[in-house]
Amino acid sequence: MAIKQLSETLINQIAAGEVIERPASAAKELIENAIDAGATRIEIATAGGGKSLLRITDNGSGMDSTDLELAVRRHCTSKLSDTLDDIHSLGFRGEALPSIGSVAKVIITSRKQGASEGAEIALSGGKVSPVRPAAANPGTVVEVRDLFFATPARLKFLKSERAEAAAITEVVKRMAIAFPKIRFTLSGSDRSTLEFPATGEDHLARIAQILGSDFRDNAIALDAEREDVQLSGFAGVPTFNRGNSAHQYAFVNGRPVQDKLILSAVRGAYAETIPHGRYPIVVLSFTLDPALVDVNVHPAKSDVRFRDPGMVRGLVVGAVREALTREGDRSSTKGASDMLRAFRPGYRPPQPSPSATWTTQSSPYRPFTPGAAGGFGEPVQSAFDTMTVPAARAEMPVQPMRPDTETAGVEPVERFPLGAARAQVHKNYIVAQTPDGLVIVDQHAAHERLVYESLRTALRGRRLPSQGLLIPEIIDLPEEDCDRLMAHAADLDQLGLAIERFGPGAIAVRETPAMLGEVDADALVRQLADEIAEWDTAGGLAAKLEYVAATMACHGSVRSGRVLRVEEMNALLRKMEETPGSGQCNHGRPTYVELKLSDIERLFGRS
């Protein structure tokens, strides 16, 4: 078969298959052109999910008749110099307009700023009409109709009009977050009008337009730099999370990207602070020399390749974890707002979805008996660290306290962010009075987090104190589980868990971490074996030790149903105040909810 040259129309249609996958892809390319043209107002109108109509109107620099003739030809662009190492624009390939014009009916009307008249050019299935004069406002209007009419097979792969319209909305949101100085308006017969007024330099205000006003109260600012790569943006507190990753936004030199490396780094940064099936809300913006990143990986330009991906991953993990350590002990304001909503007439609690189910330990309650290291570990010692609990205390009623007097031996409430303990209710919740409201603490979730942080500290320092068992506990396990556990016996020993082989198919536990007190060694070791089987790859367990620490912490925390003395409750509050990340437990559940006095007064109609 003889080789022949493909026609220009067929070449453009092939290119369209890569660049224009759906109406949202066309919207993205055209919005990028408007931004590159310096527009401060961009209007997007759609019909039929963008399949029937997609119109982009901007007030950018505009084009004259000569520009229009070149704009609809492949590989014609004003945005690229002689190298791909110095790209400062969103578009640069010169493929979008001819690709769209090869599969749709397109009319481009434009007028340069300061020009007396505009010009217009039309394309239909790859055929270009001559440029003609046209009345136009300064800027450009690109109107796309009957997308994919020239390639009907592509229409079969599109989703419903509602789904395609939603995809365009998501594109506009990402662009709006990246460029807060631009006003975006999204309208059409298939949607209600959506407006994002320009916010200038206030990036957080623009993000709040997209993600909701709650994000402003639950966001932690990021500002980090490593090897000439700057990272800015905002990370949501762990307890302010969602059921999917759609609320994670990343931008590289202003370009919205959906990079697997960045998303993986975000998961690592929030490890053990977000429950399974939940996702943090983050907005990450990277600024770096264009030569350090390749944006020409795919025609859609949504993927990038960093020259040093390991450094970028470390930058993300380090910056987010530093922010969470600095302010992440804050509990999400959503807990308080949900509580206030629950008091309103007619409120019905939402039914949890499977993805939102909290993961908890199913092991039975065992009385807590502290070891040599105390309840929280070194170096802090308190009344709560060295307490003993008689068996009869589990059935004792709540000890009432006068609300406006300080308990003996307790500092004044004004000195502490989490206040002074006033009561324990339902044998699990500590009620504390703060200077301007009250705090309700989940004692099990809070103590679990504190134990976990002590275990994490031990991973970076000396071995945790352990307590020897009078009679070693023998645990029968499959041979492969025994092999996995013994391969990491040294790592587990660092955490105070001493194990050794006890014949074929059995493990002997001789020491357990002292801070865990009386622990169900059998359940702990079996769960560790399961987790090691899941994580034990070529990298070994070293990178997963924090997960092991979380598992051990949950087995050794103060259980629900445990009655605490006043000094024990206050000791827990003081330890929470000085422990990073104490606002959520290892599974991502909030450890406390704060109500301001003004909120409480509103409940009673006093404000």
Image (tube, rainbow, N blue to C red):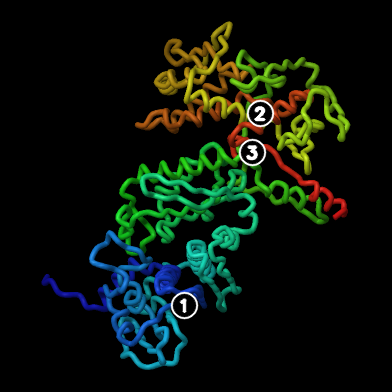
Image x and y of residue 158, in percent: 44, 68
Q: Nearer the viewer, residue 286 or 531?
A: 286
Nearest the eye: 49 or 94: 94
Three-letter amino acid code at disc 3? Gly
Amino acid under disc 2: Lys
**Who's the residue at 41% across and 30% down the image?**
536
Question: Closest to the observer: 335 or 154?
Answer: 335
- Where, quadrant-wise, is the N terminus in this rendering? bottom left
Q: Nearer the viewer, mark 2 or mark 3?
A: 2
- In the rendered structure, find residue 583 and report the number of the disc placed on it: 3
Q: Residue at x 50, y 43 (%)?
A: 320
Classify 10 Å Cα crowding around label 2: few (below 14), some (14-19), many (20 and above): some
Q: Crowding at label 1, few (<14), some or many (≥20) Cα neighbours within 10 Å?
A: many
The residue drawn where x is 42% and y is 83% is: 113
- Is 541 left, or right, of 1 in this rendering? right
Q: Is the C-beta separation of discs 1 and 2 under 8 Å? A: no
- Closer to the chain start, of discs 3 and 1, is 1
Q: Is residue 270 left or right of residue 16?
A: right
Q: Residue at x 77, y 28 (%)?
A: 411
Q: Check disc 3: other Cα within 10 Å, few if <14, some if 14-19, many if 20+.
A: many
Q: Is residue 435 above or below residue 33?
A: above
First in sequence: mark 1 vs mark 2: 1
Mark 3, mark 1: which one is toward the viewer?
Answer: 3
Relative to 81, say whether 601 is above or below.
above
Q: Which residue is mark 1?
A: 56
